[in-house]
Amino acid sequence: MGTKKLYIETYGCQMNEYDTDRIKNALDAEPTDDPKSADIIIVNTCAIRDKADQKAFSSLGKFKSRKANDPNVIVGISGCVAQLYGDKLLKKIPHLDFVLGPRAIPKLPDIIARIESEKRRTVETSYDIEELFEIEPYHKEGKVTAFVSVQQGCNKRCTYCIVPTVRGDEVNRDLNDILRETNNLVSKGVREISFIGQTVNSWKKDGHKFGDLIRAAGEIENLDRIRFTTSYPRDITKKMIDAMKDVPQVCHHLHLPVQSGSDKVLSMMKRTYTRQWYVDTINRLKDAIPDITISTDIIIGFPGETDQDFQETMSLMREMEFESSYSFKFSPRPGTVAAEYSGEDIVDPQVASARLSELQAYQKEITETKNQSRVGKIEKVLVEGESRNDPEFLSGRTDHNRILNFKGPKDLVGKTVEVEVKEGLLNSLRGELVV
Ligand code: SAH
Ligand code: F3S
């Protein structure tokens, strides 16, 4: 297997990026960026919205002629679209060799071996995989940030969401396992860990709660920064806030999806909190950690969303002034409760688009203003590498998760330095190293 070349394309969330790295390790193949030279081609897919599905299918289409010219190349689909459609995909996509659900990654080496020996197309989407966390991700040498998965699946069942269907019920990982993987990464030079899970702060295991996990991670030597995503508002407890406050490595930024500012819509989404509860929670966080910044997710055009409901979302945006937000038009997903709505409950697509544009324009203004307000401030930056757009610049993130680019020597990578902000742009900051 060792000499095989693996090309893998990744769509979707951090969990998928993490799974991509697990697939790389599972196969012990050499990762390549060039699909033409690859022996194994995998598209790791996302099913969260309709467009994500479409992207995955068109991505697979690109490899049709490659497979026609070289029947020995193995083409597979993994991730949530694979789980959702299963063996239907083999019928729909004739050049596909395997379909692999997100929980089945530990089975991949066997699947590949079987395809090679028996030339048989395979579907593996079972849930009852015991070795769920067994394969740890591939780590690129020199990378100073890394994800560590603490949880698979989700128990919340928001009515619009396909994640519980495709990733199954919540399964939490052993504390020792999480700490071992984290320690291992730190020994390879990683300085910032992001714990990831669909509702990461719901993590609990063997009597330990999420706050205990943060405190335990805070004891790890040479781990400079701790982040985690995505938090679920209702599971923010006093214990968690206290741990965030007490552990100095915890970054002062929290991604806390609210989805809507209307109680009616929140209740239809089954989000289990009210707008006021969400606001109060953020206030509790700010009381404990005054400089904390918050980002969020919003869904626009959920069935039954009236103009009044949308205005309530806009008023929440104004009240909260989120650091940034990801906003999406509601997309009905197969098998979810919210996909059952029809008739006059459906928000006219043009109305939804107009609402989305209004919200995004407002957010853009806020984000830009917030970025500009940081000019003159000195920020601590963990240097991650060269800037993607301009190799003259180094790039890293501030404690508040803003990208900050500045000029400096390459040997600063992996170090935390002080940078004075000189310019606030929409998606990043620019500054000068403080010496
Ligand atoms: N628990 C994870 C994954 C949720 S999916 C997390 O919170 O990050 C990420 C975001 O996609 C959600 O917060 C929601 O805003 C959006 N989303 C999920 N399902 C959607 C749907 N059917 N239509 C539109 N947006 C959706
Ligand atoms: Fe989806 Fe809600 Fe879980 S958004 S991932 S069902 S918390």
Image: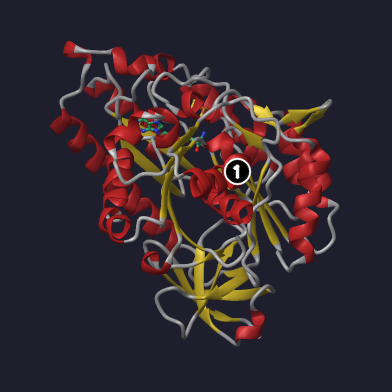
Q: Residue furthest front?
A: 118
Q: Is residue 249 visible?
A: yes
Q: Is residue 262 left or right of residue 255?
A: left
**What residue is shown at x 43% (from left), y 39% (from top)?**
121
Where is residue 349 shown, x and y percent of the image?
16, 30
Where is residue 286 shown, x and y percent of the image?
62, 41
Which amino acid lies under the numbered mark 1 shown in the image of this protein? Asp
Q: Nearer the viewer, residue 99 or 297?
A: 99
**What residue is shown at x 57% (from left), y 85% (from top)?**
408
Q: Residues within 10 Å of mark 1 (few under 14, many from 20)?
A: few
- Identify the image quadrant of residue 3: bottom right
Q: Nearer the viewer, residue 416 or 196?
A: 196
Its colouring scheme is secondary structure
Looking at the rendered image, the quarter that the C terminus falls into is: bottom right
Where is residue 425 shown, x and y percent of the image?
38, 67
The residue beneath circle 1 is 110
Looking at the rendered image, the quarter that the N terminus falls into is: bottom right
Where is residue 376 shown, x and y percent of the image?
52, 72
- Identify the image quadrant of residue 171: top right
Dot 1: what SS? helix
**What residue is shown at x 45% (from left), y 45% (from top)?**
119
